Image (cartoon, grey):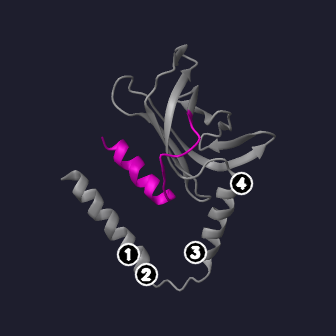
Amino acid sequence: MKKLFMMSALAAAIMLTACSGNGKTGTDDSASQDATVLETTLPVTSGEYRAVSFQDTAADAVRTRFDGRILMALDPDNAGIYIYENGNRTHFKAKAILSKIFEQKDSIYIASDKDNREITLIPGKENVDTLIVYRGSVPVKVSFETKPMSTLTPTEVWNRISTQLSK
């Protein structure tokens, strides 16, 4: 019932946004151009990725067989990352609302979260990239497959993130 209500509210919001005649012209084109430029400069796109391992520096834990997921919404105006375990064995979750989108620094990419902490994306070899995010105040390294399981729009990613958070 809760899921049906959330989906109905989302559908109504999308319809209202699409049908509103607010007189703005050209802003949608520039936003889509910004998103296209962003996607061509980054080694990742908005979508769902398979997380394969993580290293929690505070707990001194390394998990090399990790069945996790990374949801990335990479929109210049509304970017975020949510990492969770696909199941309930370790109860691993990490999230970051990005205040500054990824920018290339040498061979790595740096972003900032809303708490002004650096989020680092390290393009890897052998089809595995690494992301350094914060789980609370602790930095965590998460390795994930370079190729997304599914390529999604940032809006679709945010819908999946809200679904995961409501579980």
Q: Is residue 161 magenta?
A: yes
Q: Crowdedness of circle 1 by 10 Å Cα count: few (<14), some, many (20+)? A: few
Evaluate if marks 2 and 1 touch, with contact meaning CB atoms under 8 Å apart: yes
Q: Position of residue 64 (x, y in %)?
A: 51, 20
Q: Image check: 167 left or right of 59?
A: left
Which label number is shown at residue 96? none
Residue at the disc numbered 3: 28
Mark closer to the chain start, 3 or 2: 2
In terms of sequence position, does the residue under pointer 3 or pointer 4 come before the other? 3
| 68 or 1, nearer to the observer | 68
Front of the two marks 3 and 4: 4
Give residue 41's mark.
4
Q: Residue furthest front?
A: 126
* Alpha carbons under labels 2 and 1: distance apart: 6 Å
Mark 3, Cα crowd under 10 Å, few <14 / some 14-19 / many 20+, is: few
Sequence order check: which comes first, mark 2 or mark 4? Answer: 2
Q: Which corner quadrant of the image does residue 164 belong to? A: top left
Q: Amino acid at mark 3?
A: Asp
The residue at 56%/30% (across/down) is 142
Of 120 and 69, nearer the camera is 69
Distance from Cα at disc 3 to Cα at disc 1: 16 Å
Asked which quadrant contains residue 7, the reply is: bottom left
Which residue has dot 1 on it? 16
Chain-order first, disc 1 or disc 4: 1
The numbered mark, 3 or 1, whose residue comes first in the sequence reads 1
Residue kind at label 4, given as amino acid type: Thr
Say which quadrant the C terminus sits in.
top left
**Chain part drawn in magenta:** 144-167
Mark 1 or mark 4: which is in front? 4
Q: Find residue 2 and report its horizontal and vertical position in percent.
A: 22, 52
Q: Tell me the kind of residue under disc 1.
A: Leu
